[in-house]
Image (cartoon, rainbow, N blue to C red):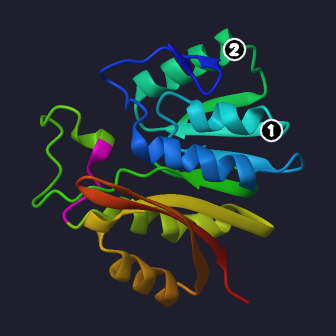
Amino acid sequence: MILFGFDMEFSSEVYVPREDTYLMVEILRDEVNQDDKVLDMGTGSGILAMISAEVCETVVAVDLNDKAVELGRKNASSNGLENIEFVKSDLFENVDGVFDLVVFNAPYLPYEGSVDRDLKGSEQWCGGGGGREILSRFMDGVEDHLSEDGRVLFLISSLTNLDEVESMLTDGGFEYEVVGKRKIPWEELYVVRVQPGD
């Protein structure tokens, strides 16, 4: 399937790009610079890493799912993009170095109760009880991996509770701005740009 000019392969075991991905791509294309070193957290099919790799020289793409790492690597290779390193990691566990831009289309939907890995595909969309638990863990670790002027783009939903996310960012000393949003039938999507505060 051709998506954003790439010949892509997808799998039911890996998050398939949807409205959230499309919004993130629009923002990312305006955000990524030639000099950026980019980290794509939760890469899935690899599409955000590939968008970045067309512009900049160095991209690291991370996913907890073995199948996603394998699929992302295959998609990048079949499109001739050799400047992406794919890494299996639980968030920053196996990530070294600092980055100018960190992109995270996080699992953000709430699921009351603990994440049941037997609930098919839940790890692709479930952000924890309130939808913010994975994002909170991510924000706890991201500052250690940002360059001096590094910034973060992440996507959340109205179902995640934007006010709670804003409080989390403020309490963590981050500056933030909503740089994109889109209303879809069951929720509103937001892309947030974040930088450490002074």
* Dominant secondary structure of the residues highlighted in magenta in the image: loop
Up/down of 85 relative to 189, above or below: above
Residue 71 placement, left or right of 109: right
Residue at position x 63%, y 19% from top?
6
Question: Can residue 47 be seen by looking at this rendering?
Answer: yes
Residue at position x 50%, y 19% from top?
70
Mark 1 is surrounded, within 10 Å at the Cα level, by few (under 14), some (14 to 19) or many (20 or more) other residues, namely: many
Q: Which residue is mark 2?
A: 79
Q: Which label's residue is closer to the chain start, 2 or 1?
A: 1
Q: Position of residue 108 (x, y in %)?
A: 33, 56
Q: Position of residue 179 (x, y in %)?
A: 59, 67
Up/down of 189 relative to 65, above or below: below
User: What is the secondary structure assignment of the residue under circle 1?
Assistant: strand
Q: Which residue is mark 1?
A: 58
Residue 84 placement: quadrant = top right
Highlighted magenta segment, given as a residue range: 125-129
